[in-house]
Image: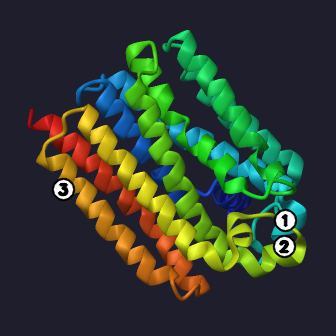
Amino acid sequence: MSALDPIRRRWTLYVRLVRLDKPIGVLLLLWPTLTALWIATDGQPPALLLGIFVLGTFLTRSAGCAINDVVDRDFDGHVKRTADRVVSSGALSPLEAVAVAVVLLLLAALLLIPLNALTFWLAVVGVIVATTYPFFKRFFPLPQAYLAIAFSFGIPMAFAAALGHVPTIGWWLFAANLFWVVAYDTEYAMVDRDDDIRIGVRSSAILFGRADVAAVMFCYGAHLSLLLVVGSVIHARWPFYLGWAAAFGCVVYHYLLIRSRAREDCFRAFRHNQWVGLAVFAGVALDYALR
């Protein structure tokens, strides 16, 4: 047995705690943030801002995962999908997980030093929303809407960092993203619905009941419609609408997956949303690159 084996095992637990082995969450946060940054800078984001927002997205999402696992440690063991999480299984103590989250948040805070005051205060609000989200699942019937606020805060932050204020287009993009998050996180909640009902956790999948598929598609429709408003405001050209069409195709595919409400298919639809975000970002980035 190597002397490094205990360190490797500990590192593996930390990787699982902050979901380094499951980067889907980072991508779902990153694509809309980059889309906002590209629009705010007319397609020419400074390298410093780009690095700050990429690294900041990774750090804050990782910290959020650690906090979520601590808060949900008494529930995760009763849900099939989360039964092996490292805090609920006892592999890591809650105190150790909180320490990891604190370190990650402190590192993220250091990234704010070169940015303006508005960006700092938006970051503070975003962190408060993100860290309190796990508690909302106890009493709020639509916690996915609260999560959507947390998962969309990179958008006004990007505009604030680049422009010193958040213009109307930033809030249109923010609103569009809110609907997208509710759509894909409802797909995620459909995977756990039976377990959540049994243990008393709230979710949009439970709230919507048999109207869940219709609600998801409505949210996707609102997301895509608001993106058309964004495209009109920025005077988008064909690359933007090509990306929009690709996102629309993904949404149709998601409908085909979730209409049966099978756990595996709902989870597949949720994970596939990384391509929705990429399609929108790629359309925006190519649009500005060709101007």
Other-residue count near label 1 (Cα within 10 Å), few / some / many at <14 / 14–19 / ≥20:
many
In the image, taking residue 73 as reference, residue 44 lies left or right, namely: left
Q: Mark 2 or mark 1, which is nearer the start of the sequence?
A: 2
Nearer to us of marks 2 and 3 is 3
Question: Measured from the top left, where is residue 10 in percent x and y?
Answer: 72, 57
What's the mark number on residue 242? 3
Q: Quadrant of residue 205?
A: bottom right
Q: Given the image, on which type of amino acid does mark 3 rest?
A: Leu
Q: Which residue is mark 1?
A: 88
Q: Residue at x 60, y 48 (%)?
A: 148
How far, Cα to Cα, is label 1 from label 2?
6 Å
Q: Which residue is mark 2?
A: 77
Other-residue count near label 3 (Cα within 10 Å), few / some / many at <14 / 14–19 / ≥20:
some
Q: Secondary structure at mark 1?
A: loop
**Where's the C terminus, which quadrant?**
top left
Q: How is the image coloured?
A: rainbow
Q: Secondary structure at mark 3?
A: helix
Q: Residue at x 78, y 56 (%)?
A: 69
Q: Quadrant of residue 231?
A: top left
In the image, taking residue 91 as reference, residue 258 lies left or right, namely: left
Q: Mark 3 or mark 2, which is nearer the start of the sequence?
A: 2
Q: Nearer the viewer, residue 82 or 206?
A: 206
Tell me if residue 22 can be seen. Answer: no
